Image (cartoon, rainbow, N blue to C red):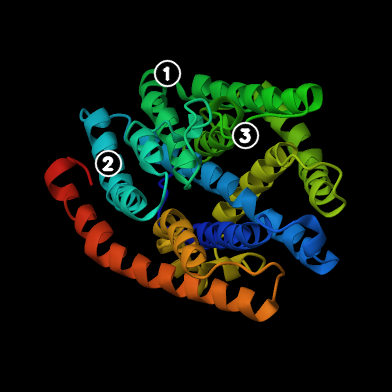
Amino acid sequence: MRRDLGHVPELDGLRGLAALGVFVLHVFNSAIDPLPPAAVSPTWKLLSRLAGFGTLGVDVFFVLSGFLITSLLLADRANPSFFRDFYAKRLLRIQPVYLVHMLLAWFLLPNSHGYVLLGFVFLVNFDAQFHVPDVGPAWSLSIEEQFYLVWPQLVRRISLATLFRVCIGLAIFSSALRTGMILIAHHADVRSTWYRLDGLAIGALLACQWMGEGESQTTAVRRFLRLFNSTAALVAACAAAALFILGLTRNIGLAMLPANYLTYRLIRYVLAYPSSRRFGWMGARPLVFLGAISYSSYMLHTIFLSLYDRRVPPETTLDPFRFAVRAGVVALATLVSCLIVRHGVELPAQRLRRYLVSRP
């Protein structure tokens, strides 16, 4: 049974929450990291640890992206212009805001030229190997674009059942590699593509289940999923809570698989029970609005943080009032810039689909 994926406001709200979490994380990190540990009170350290949950917003983005893009690819597999349409849509969706970010970074951020050059070939996630300073969030876009350079080829050419198995294999491979490196070498480069494929693969797995339920799952696979789903959600929630709240590790890589799985379960529930009381609040207008500007806010807010800190040097201690002013000014600047970019760049670019895409 093949299903059509319509607009789901709760998924926009989930994207908005993820972007908000990343924003809070960066506001705290950029304020606390330059200070000596003795200058940070226990209260600020606790707040910083709670803000650390925001880093999992990127994992939410990956799962959502894997699900939504794979759903669209599966729905379009019979289209003779499959590849041209996909890459044209991707170009119009990603590149306008991406170019705005790169131009602003080039002219406004110091030591950003290497970052921008890597950004144009989507290799920012390997900036350490090129000895390029990390000045922005384009590393996550690099991972996605590297993935989507290959993924449509597989979706087009292999059966749904085989694609289902590929998703499971990628999720196991990437999460096992990352976890093994953390446990054995006590470190994993979580911005390396190989260590972050599980989020995209888990999202794609859900797309295979949702768009082609009954086609992609053999009896053995169904039994495996029932066994897995009966215990994994509880284990994932407990592991994520322990890793962050109890501070059992400083390496966020161990919390990524639980976060990816919980996002998978949440999306699946929202799809099965739209507008339910449990998660219907995610479709509220403020969250849907944040979801609509989530991409531009993700790409622009770090620039305003950097500009603010260059003009208003941080104090040697954290003052709640100054912290709130800083967060408010950056949030307002980000919001205004997102509205300008949305109506002046994003939406006009989307209207070009009629000329470049055979099936908009």
Residue 308 relative to residue 228: left or right: left
Mark 2 closeness class: few <14, some 14–19, many ≥20 residues within 10 Å: some
Residue 35 pos. (x, y %): 70, 59
Q: Residue at x 81, y 51 (%)?
A: 241
- In the rendered image of this protein, does residue 94 appear above or below residue 277? above
Distance (Cα) linking label 2 and label 3: 26 Å
Query: 209 and 82: which one is in front?
Result: 82
Viewer can see residue 277: yes
Q: Which residue is mark 1?
A: 158
- In the rendered image of this protein, does residue 264 appear above or below residue 347? above
Q: Amino acid at mark 2?
A: Leu
Total marks shown come to 3
Residue 51 pos. (x, y %): 69, 60
Q: Residue furthest left?
A: 355
Q: Amino acid at mark 1?
A: Ile
Distance (Cα) linking label 1 and label 2: 24 Å
Residue 252 relative to residue 113: left or right: right
Residue 4 pos. (x, y %): 40, 46
Per the rendering, the mark at residue 190 is: 3
- In the rendered image of this protein, does residue 167 appear above or below residue 76? above
Q: Residue at x 51, y 19 (%)?
A: 162
Q: Residue at x 45, y 35 (%)?
A: 124
Q: Residue at x 48, y 57 (%)?
A: 302
- The mark nearer the N terminus, 2 or 3, is 2
For discs 2 and 3, the disc positioned in front in the rendered view: 3
Q: Which residue is mark 2?
A: 91
Instruction: Kindly state the secondary structure of the residue where label 1 is placed.
Output: loop
Residue 216 pos. (x, y %): 53, 27
